[in-house]
Amino acid sequence: MTAPETWITPLTPLAFLRRSADVYPDKVAIVHGTERTTYAQFAAQAQRLARGLRASGVGPGDRVACLLPNVPAMLVAHFGVPLAGAVLVAVNTRLSSEEVRYILDHSGSTVLVVDSALRRTVEPIADSLETVREVVTLVDPQGPDAGTSVEGPTWDDLLARGEGGDDLPWEVDDERSTISINYTSGTTGRPKGVQYHHRGAYLNSFGEIVHSYHDPSSVYLWTLPMFHCNGWCTPWAITAIGGTHVCLREVRGDAIWRLIGEHRVTHLNGAPTVVTTIMNAAEARTLDYALVVTTAGAPPSPTTILEMEEMGFRIVHVYGLTETYGPYSVCQWQEEWRGLEEHARAKLQARQGVGMLQTEPLRVVEVLPDDVTDWASVELVDVPADATTMGEIVMRGNNVMSGYYRDPDATAKAFAGGWYHSGDLGVMHPDGYVELRDRAKDVVISGGENISTVEVEQAVLSHPAVLEAAVVGVPDDRFGERPKAFVVLRQGESAEPDDIVEHVKGVIARYKAPRDVELVAELPKTSTGKIQKFELRAKEWGDSETRIRG
């Protein structure tokens, strides 16, 4: 007997809030300063937002943009916008006015919700946006503008439009319809709009729950921006499991440690540089319980992993990209690692690992030549699983984007041979674990030798005085280019550049060591804590970088 079609319901993370509101109606879902929002209230706000958007003329498939920090309204938008049948466009809060303009115009957003503290970004472009019909301002009661009034419609006005009426169904007709569009950083050109669908967001949420060890007692601190890959799908994941969201407008070490103490935070996510901020805050202390830190964005050094463990943090190392809904692979713990010497164990933990339970296995394939034009007919060839042969990491499946919005050529290129091409170079170990070696554009080719900047950075970070490090290729008359390290020292520590170079030569092959080490006060970073190497390269290469590097 074949099951009736009605027995199969399309997958959508909207169902998560419906369930948690039914199961945990009086449980605190969101903490923000002195505010407390229960799951019943959370669901009611999402319904009001959805109805308010519809009353404002937002129809199925329309794009609704949010320029918001990690505040409760951003969590509500992750449910209320798709509940209205619309597509959420979460905009990076650190972008310039012109960058925001491009995203709003390219996405065709019809409504923009902006935090009052970010109005200064929108005001210069508000009257010249191509498709935005209405700008709605949120005045956060816990923010810097609390108690002030603003011109034009407010968040409360938008919700008021949705008062009364029947609840909208927590479901979708097509699970492959777009739930959100996330724009890439655009460091090598115009940002691209990465399309997520309901099915992928639903499944990725389960991966976050399982691999980051969430349960209904989870207290999750929002150190990761919700605009970044929809917070790695964690707005949906924490809601699904019935955990508690603790909002944080700004990532500062003192604020993080205060909230850890007040709420006994059990989980947080972030790039290794965010973790460094937490560990080196004046308020840092050793915890009397295990706080799970899920980290991605760059390989954490073995040194960082060991330091975090000493402070009571349990490390979950994941890897992914905006195009893969955030995390796609995890360095899955193996019990036999427990008996290893700690540095050998930490080195294993620094690998990018294997596919998460909701994903397809990772592949490492030979890098395609530059002259490929027929992307569909490309045949991919796996490199040997020898932990040495470098290739490009590729992925496919439910948790890979459905494509770049309004960019079919870039989509076709990204999916050459039927797999998404990450642009990341790595090796496959005999045990099936992938290790990232570099971004393709970051590899230093010195005298014909490929040098992984990641490997050099980890060697630099093993110096006891080093807090942060970034390595890039710089011009060299003899070898074409060579590695150079930019280093931030730990507070109260000192080290001479030559000492750091000699230390590195004792850790890795001498030819890979940087000739120069520049001590800096800070490294340029994105809003998610990733180090912006292109800025460091531009400083060294000037106008010649484009000519030499591509």
Image (tube, rainbow, N blue to C red):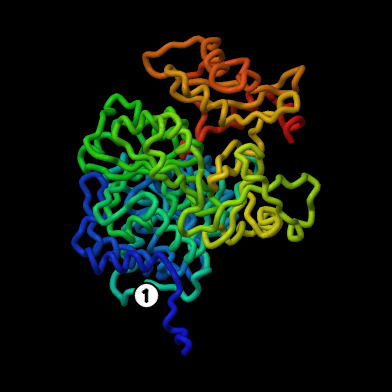
> Is 341 in front, or is 313?
341
From what the image shows, is residue 351 above or below residue 42? above
Q: Position of residue 71 (x, y in %)?
A: 34, 49
From what the image shows, is residue 409 above or below residue 431? below
The tally of labels here is 1
Which quarter of the rendering shows the C terminus? top right
Q: Is residue 383 visible?
A: yes
- Residue 269 is drawn in which quadrant? top left
Q: Position of residue 339 (x, y in %)?
A: 37, 36
Query: Which residue is found at the position 42% from the left and 50% from the top?
Result: 231
From what the image shows, is residue 8 above or below residue 46? below
- Residue 195 is drawn in which quadrant? bottom right
Q: Position of residue 538 (x, y in %)?
A: 65, 27
> Is 449 in front, or is 156?
449
Q: Position of residue 540 (x, y in %)?
A: 65, 22
Query: Which residue is found at the position 34% from the left and 29% from the top?
Result: 279
Query: Which residue is found at the position 30% from the left and 31% from the top?
Result: 311
Q: Counting other residues with Cα less than 10 Å from the Cα at mark 1, is it few (<14), some (14-19), or many (20 or more)?
A: few
Q: Is residue 128 visible?
A: no
> Is 91 in front, or is 417?
417
What secondary structure is marked by label 1?
A: loop
Looking at the image, residue 165 sits to the left or right of residue 261; the answer is right
Three-letter residue code for mark 1: Pro
**Residue highlighted by disc 1:** 169
Query: Which residue is found at the position 51% from the left and 25% from the top?
Result: 469
Looking at the image, residue 168 sits to the left or right of residue 350; the answer is left
